[in-house]
Amino acid sequence: MNLFKKLAVGAVTSMSLMASAAYAQVEIQWWHAMGGRLGEVVEEIAAKYNASQSEYVVVPTYKGGYEDTMTAGIAAFRAKQQPNIIQIFDAGAATIIYSKGAVVPVADLLEKYAGGFDSTDYIEGVRYFYADNEGKMIGMPFNSSTPLLYYNKDIFAKVGLDGPPATWEELEAMAPKLKEAGYQALAQSHSPWIWAENFMSRHNLPLATANNGYDSTDVKILYNTPELRMHWTKVKEWLDKGWYGYYGRGWGDNQDAFVQQKVAMWLGSSGSFGGLTKSAEFKFGAAYLPYWKSVVDEPTSTFIGGAALFAMAGKSEEENKGVADFLKFLTNPEMQYFWHRETGYVPITNAAYEMAKADGYYDTTPDAEIGILQLTQKSGEWTKGYRLGFYVQIREVMYKNFEDILSGKASVEDAFAAIEKDGNALLARFHDTYK
């Protein structure tokens, strides 16, 4: 055989082997809600995984925002066209967890196919949020974040303030000085998440009956409390005094007020850190979510927001094995550190956090550590999270009534009575649907 024929035979053989290998790959569909730069990082993660092995190929697909992705997943499940993995946000977690037969617990998948699962490998602030009432992890925390206070160091220096407030009482002492200098003291994004859900966690207050909803769907909401009514009475006073700026429900609109230096402080997400480093043309810092000293002497940790990855049921053994393999890859320290650096979301495992520390990341970027430090502060009875059905709709109820308070359309008392009434009606309807 001449050289050309040998090369041709070799090429054909190689192509056949490659085709055989490609044909043998098991496809894992991953529906997600990460647009923009976050979506690009998701694509990079999938590419890294696909290049790391030849047995499976992960195919990420952007399905729109959180609500769009969840709606698409529900419709696909009913049509038996569900993906292997779907990203579900915090407010929608109860819907998918309580939907019988919809998902396979990730703890079970990793235990069966990936050499085991130990919840203590995950940082305390994230390990229980997507777990059942016995602590079994149902969804894998993915883009995990927690609310933080960002402050403009240039404005603080100009006004003569030494540092960010640790308490809301301290903020009230700073605000007149900032107003006199021409700045609103504070804006915030996502009122229900920061000034309702995490308000309760920060002050170790129950958010709902039945163990914050983890023990039952027969549950009532507990937002109509003296502590939360006091807080929103203060918020209305801050607004009237020009200390607080409300820029609507849009996350970005409130963040933009901070970026444009209209406000000196902004309550956002630890996951906002990466974006701020690119958009803010001033020095800024991150600090813990303030608390009311009048309510607690020592604050407790906040819990996570964001979303988790759920393994949808009804798939073959081979595909489930591939999902477990991908989740194992996704949670390895190197990948979690990569995700943390690129996005600002917290690393979900202790090993990844230790890797970031050992690499000196927080020596050069100390503000990137604030979120994980807050999540690992002293926990309390009510700091692991909540599990409430139709919570997307309950958040809409809260938004409406918070806006009624700010516009003067409703008193704080009437607004919280409405939240209690309408929230409990939604919870009762969810209970009737899923019991």
Image (spheres, grey):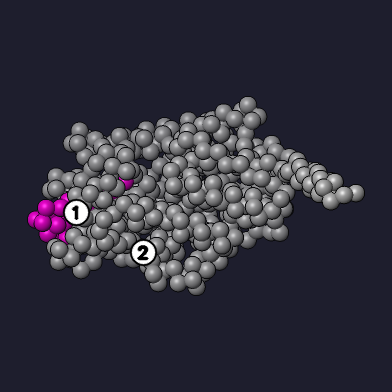
Amino acid type at circle 1 is: Ala
Image point (62%, 56%), residue name: 329
Label 2 crowd (10 A; few <14 / some 14-19 / many >=20): some
Q: Tell me, yes or no, whether the highlighted magenta stretch contains residue 49.
A: no
Q: Tell me, yes or no, whether the highlighted magenta stretch contains residue 175.
A: yes
**Is residue 374 in view?**
no
Where is residue 152 shown, x and y percent of the image? 24, 59
Image point (70%, 56%), residue name: 114
Disc 2 vs disc 1: which is toward the camera?
Answer: 2
- Where 422 sits versus 114, above or below? above
Circle 2 SS class: helix
Label 1 crowd (10 A; few <14 / some 14-19 / many >=20): many
- The label on residue 252 is none
If the image is split into quadrants, where does the C terminus sit? top right
Q: Residue placed farthest to the left in the image? A: 180
User: Foreground: 19 or 411?
Assistant: 19
Label 1 near label 2: C-beta < 8 Å?
no
- The label on residue 185 is 1
Q: Which residues are magenta?
A: 173-189
User: Foreground: 232 or 68?
Assistant: 68
User: Foreground: 104 or 135?
Assistant: 104
Q: Residue placed farthest to the top in the image? A: 79
- Where 332 sits versus 106, above or below? below
Image point (28%, 42%), residue name: 253
Where is residue 279 shown, x and y percent of the image? 31, 52
Where is residue 25 shown, x and y percent of the image? 73, 44
Determine which residue is flagged by label 2: 367
